[in-house]
Amino acid sequence: MLTLLTAFQNSVGRKLLTGVTGIALVLFLITHLSANLTLFAVPDPIDNADNVFNQYALFLKNLGWLLYVAEIGLAAIFLIHAYLGAAIWWRKRQARPEAYVVTASKGGASRQSFSSRTMIVSGLLLFVFMFMHLKTFKFGPGWNPADAGYTAILADGTQIRNLSKLTIEIFRDSLGYVLFYCGIMVMLAFHLRHGVWSALQSLGAMSKGAAPVVYTVAGLIGIAIALGFFVLPIWIYIVH
Ligand code: HEM
């Protein structure tokens, strides 16, 4: 606990914690994306509630109190990451209120990019997005099992939330939702492109020689994750 408090109080510790929490969030996103991509394989996601996408949600729900612990942990990681990211940006701004006119590097290749300069903007947008996203999906229709429109009873009597139906309907019926999600995923790509590299650098995961390769690979990982989330709403809108 003391180490965590110390980490909050000095700039190296804050950068390190931002990296660790960022990597944890990336791991969550990879799991979430993997579950989402199963929707591509479901033949009739509205009427056939007994599918792999809904079964995964049921598996999570059946974890019971363990799921609550994981969700509280995830929320804490998300809030710590957002707070520290904003605090780092604020301190930099206090130290140098005027933005540089030229952003060239003194030593090796500069890692300054559009992504790195807009981390606070993409971060804030993702923060707001998260509340809207949870309201739409996590606490949306069918969250209350009494909501018959989005609950289904399987052949073995198990009650299941028809999340695949909800997901398809949200994007199928609203171009606005599709465009909003795709816009946010572009911001996510920018955020992850710089964020993954920056986290690895803070954690000391690269030697000087490997830096250009790690920079490129980290950027590609970030963009691939965002791209996966980007294509699903478009596919649903066009195909369903
Ligand atoms: C096409 C894009 C996306 C779709 C269709 C989607 C869909 C969903 C669905 C259906 C749920 C409810 C799961 C359940 O209740 O079991 C959910 C939960 C969630 N989503 Fe997404 N999601 C997308 C993108 C994202 C992104 C980009 C993020 C983060 C930046 C995110 C973060 C979350 C979180 C934190 C939860 C709550 C997890 C939990 O408490 O168990 N989602 N999403």
Image (tube, rainbow, N blue to C red):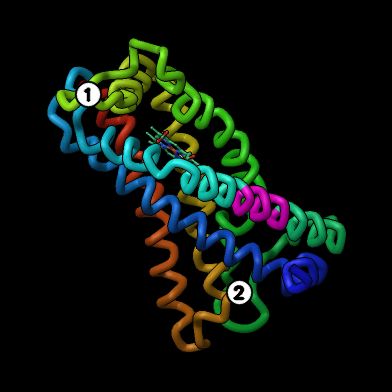
Q: Residues at badges 1 and 2 in contact (C-beta under 8 Å)?
A: no
Q: Is residue 237 left or right of residue 84?
A: left
| Residue closest to the eye, 38 or 2 | 2
Specify few, some or many for label 1: CA neighbours under 10 Å numbering under 14, 14-19, or 20 or more: few
Question: Which residue occupies the extreme front position in the image?
Answer: 157
Pinpoint residue 98: horizontal percent, then vertical percent. Answer: 82, 56
Residue where numbered disc 2 is placed = 202
| Residue closest to the eye, 12 or 235 | 12
Q: Main secondary structure of the magenta part?
A: helix
Q: Is residue 104 left or right of residue 109?
A: right
Q: Amino acid at mark 1?
A: Gly
Pinpoint residue 95: horizontal percent, then vertical percent. Answer: 86, 63
At a point 21% along the width and 21% down the height, the residue shown is 240
At a point 40% along the width and 77% down the height, the residue shown is 213
Instruction: Kindly identify which numbered label has been placed on residue 157.
Output: 1
Q: Is mark 1 within 8 Å of ligand 1?
A: no
Pinpoint residue 30: horizontal percent, then vertical percent. Answer: 38, 53
